[in-house]
Image (cartoon, rainbow, N blue to C red):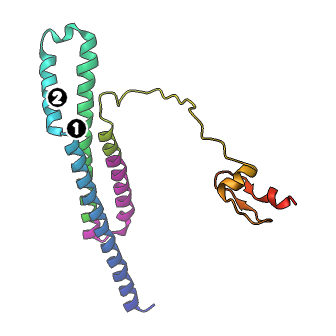
Amino acid sequence: MNPKRRSFRKKGQFCKMIVELDRFEQDVRELEKKLDETASAFDVDAMRDELDQLHREMEQPDFWNNLERAQKDATSRIKTITDRTQGIADLRAQCEDAHTLIAMCDEEQDESLVPEIESEIQDLTQKIGALYLSTLLRGEYDANDCILSLHAGAAAPRPRTGPRCSTACTPAMPRGTATRCASSTSWRGTRRASSP
């Protein structure tokens, strides 16, 4: 093989990799933007203030007198806030790791890092999507189970069949013609076509 062609092929692969890395960088930036929007919906600063308030309440001597209230309200809320804020911080760190991985792949021109970058971006996409969904389900009762029961209601009216249907849909239908009736699943006109 001609060495000039080989170097051209390598340059072509490298250019393709550069374009791919730019796309990865853009994907990570879009994911960071979505993460910031999602985090702002949670109002992380207010959550930290609430966490500080809950810790101050727990330090009060009479707080633990009502053990049921302490476990139900404060402990579960602290766990929820801690998990949520830690999850957002972990996702931000994972975005930074993805940027670092992209830069390392670009500097070293190492194509073997591309699948790792792709899996990192896919993982970020799933986690940020799940976090976004949880912003929609953050009401007071959204964390609870639900019971759903379906009851049959008024059914749709039965489709018209027979000679009445043929005149209701199209009054003038030529003899021997079979067309599909719009209000039923049966063929209209077959009966009429067979009659003398």
Q: Is residue 73 above or below residue 107?
A: above
In percent of width and height, residue 59 lies at 13, 16
Q: In the rendered structure, are the residues bearing label 2 and label 1 in contact, judged by CB atoms less than 8 Å apart?
A: yes
Which region shows up in magenta?
A: 105-129
Rendering quarter of residue 17: bottom left
The residue that mark 1 highlights is 85
- In the image, which disc is placed on residue 51? 2
Q: Three-letter amino acid code at disc 1?
A: Thr
| Lateral position of residue 137 relative to residue 181, left or right | left
**Secondary structure category for the residue under label 2:** helix
Q: Earlier in the sequence, mark 2 or mark 1?
A: 2
In percent of width and height, residue 55 lies at 15, 23
- In the image, which disc is placed on residue 68? none
Secondary structure, magenta segment, majority class? helix
Is 165 included in the stretch rendered in magenta? no
Label 1 CA crowd tier, 10 Å (few <14, some 14–19, many 20+) = some
